[in-house]
Amino acid sequence: MATKTPETTEIRGDTAGMKIKWDDSSMKSSYANVCNVTSTREEVVMLFGMNQAWNRGQTEVKIQLTDRIVISPYAAKRMSLLLANVVKEYENRFGTLNIDAAMGGGTGGEPNK
């Protein structure tokens, strides 16, 4: 799913009038259905990958890790606010996401209406 990001964004606050130009010439896209996050005092590490378990009765689940993103705790806090807003907008449009059902073995792909 491709999303169009504005080429230039104006920032308000201490950097009033500053414009950011998004350069996506080196960007790559990946899909992940698994994410794990750990942290230290100086950094937050996010691991992304694919769950390779296709059968319910499996005794071992293989997660193929594909990407590791390391950010500062400040960037992580800003990201958590952005994600919370995105999820809120999504649920307003498509219905509440029931993560309890997803944790119980469901795909989590279908929102509740």
Image: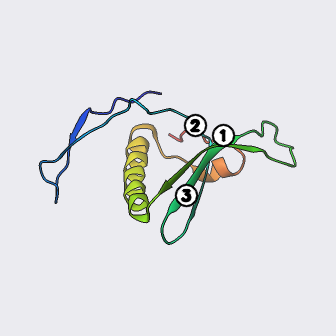
The amino acid pointed to by label 3 is Val
Residue drawn at x 61%, y 42% as measured from the top left: 108
Reply above or below: 77 against 27: below
- Distance between mark 3 and mark 2 Cα atoms: 28 Å
Asked which secondary structure carries label 2, the reply is loop
- Distance between mark 1 and mark 2 Cα atoms: 8 Å
Q: Residues within 10 Å of mark 3 (few under 14, many from 20)?
A: some
* Side of 47 relative to 43 (left or right): right
Which label lies toward us, 1 or 2? 1
110 vs 63, nearest the viewer: 63
- Residue 3 badge: none
Residue drawn at x 56%, y 54% as measured from the top left: 46
- Distance between mark 3 and mark 1 Cα atoms: 25 Å
Q: Residues within 10 Å of mark 1 (few under 14, many from 20)?
A: few
- Whether label 3 touches label 2, CB < 8 Å: no
The amino acid pointed to by label 1 is Thr
Q: Identify the residue under disc 2.
A: 110
Reply above or below: 36 against 57: below
Asked which secondary structure carries label 3, the reply is strand
Q: Identify the residue under disc 1.
A: 107
Image spot of residue 2 (x, y percent): 43, 27
Q: Residue furthest bottom?
A: 41
21 vs 81, nearest the viewer: 21
- Whether label 1 touches label 2, CB < 8 Å: yes
62 vs 57, nearest the viewer: 62
Which label lies toward us, 3 or 1? 3
- Residue 45 badge: 3
Image spot of residue 87 (x, y percent): 43, 47
The amino acid pointed to by label 2 is Glu
